[in-house]
Image: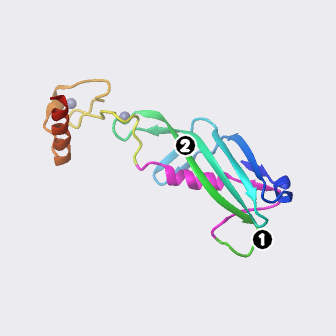
Amino acid sequence: MQLYINEALKRVGETFAFQADEQLPDQEYGTRELQFLSPATVKGEYTFNGKAFTVTANVKVSLHSVCARCNEPFDEELSFNFSERFIRQTAQEDEESYRYGGDAIVLNEAIMDNLFLQLPLVSICREDCKGLCPTCGVNRNFEQCDCCNVAPNNAFAVLLERQNEYKEV
Ligand SMILES: [Zn+2]
Ligand SMILES: [Zn+2]
């Protein structure tokens, strides 16, 4: 995804809006294979201050994910914002900033870096996913089994149960 910056380079201090859709390439991240179900929607603005560009944007992506509780595949929607600084390829300072060359800013690296920061450690298909029965392995979102009535085996679960009992009173 590229922003063409010829105008902005001439008009220092002005803010330019942009919006674009881009199919991001599938890639590996740690043990996870990131597969994008549809083009990412990137919407934002950029400003040149005479030395560097500031690009702020919102990114929406839809990822193929597998639920950590029930093992079912699902579409995981992520939306996040970023604000990044870009300096000319040949600039001597600011090793921390992204670089731009010629008449375009290439956003892909900044988008992916920020996506990695936003990825949840554990992806859950929905807030109230019941997961798999630890005893017989059925998906408790779809099926009930008789072995699922075992007492919760950790203190936190017990507390939750008690809270629910109070609520019901
Ligand atoms: Zn699930
Ligand atoms: Zn079971």
Q: Which residue is mark 1?
A: 90
Most extreme residue toward the top, as rendered? 143
Residue at the spot x=74%, y=46% of the render? 17
Q: Is residue 60 left or right of residue 152?
A: right
Q: Which residue is mark 2?
A: 79
From the image, state whether disc 2 or disc 1 is nearer to you: 2
Q: Position of residue 44 (x, y in %)?
A: 68, 46
Residue at the spot x=68%, y=55% of the render? 55
Q: Amino acid at mark 2?
A: Ser
Picture colour scheme = rainbow
Q: Which residues are magenta?
A: 96-121
Residue at mark 2: C-beta within 8 A of ligand 1: no
Q: Residues within 10 Å of mark 1 (few under 14, many from 20)?
A: few
Q: Position of residue 22 (x, y in %)?
A: 68, 41
Q: Is residue 90 above or below residue 46?
A: below
Q: Amino acid at mark 1?
A: Thr
Q: Secondary structure at mark 2?
A: strand
The label shown at residue 120 is none
Residue at the spot x=39%, y=39% of the render? 124
Residue at the spot x=61%, y=46% of the render? 58
Give 85 or 50, whichever is nearer the viewer: 50
Q: Position of residue 122 (x, y in %)?
A: 39, 46
Q: Is residue 10 above or below residue 150?
A: below
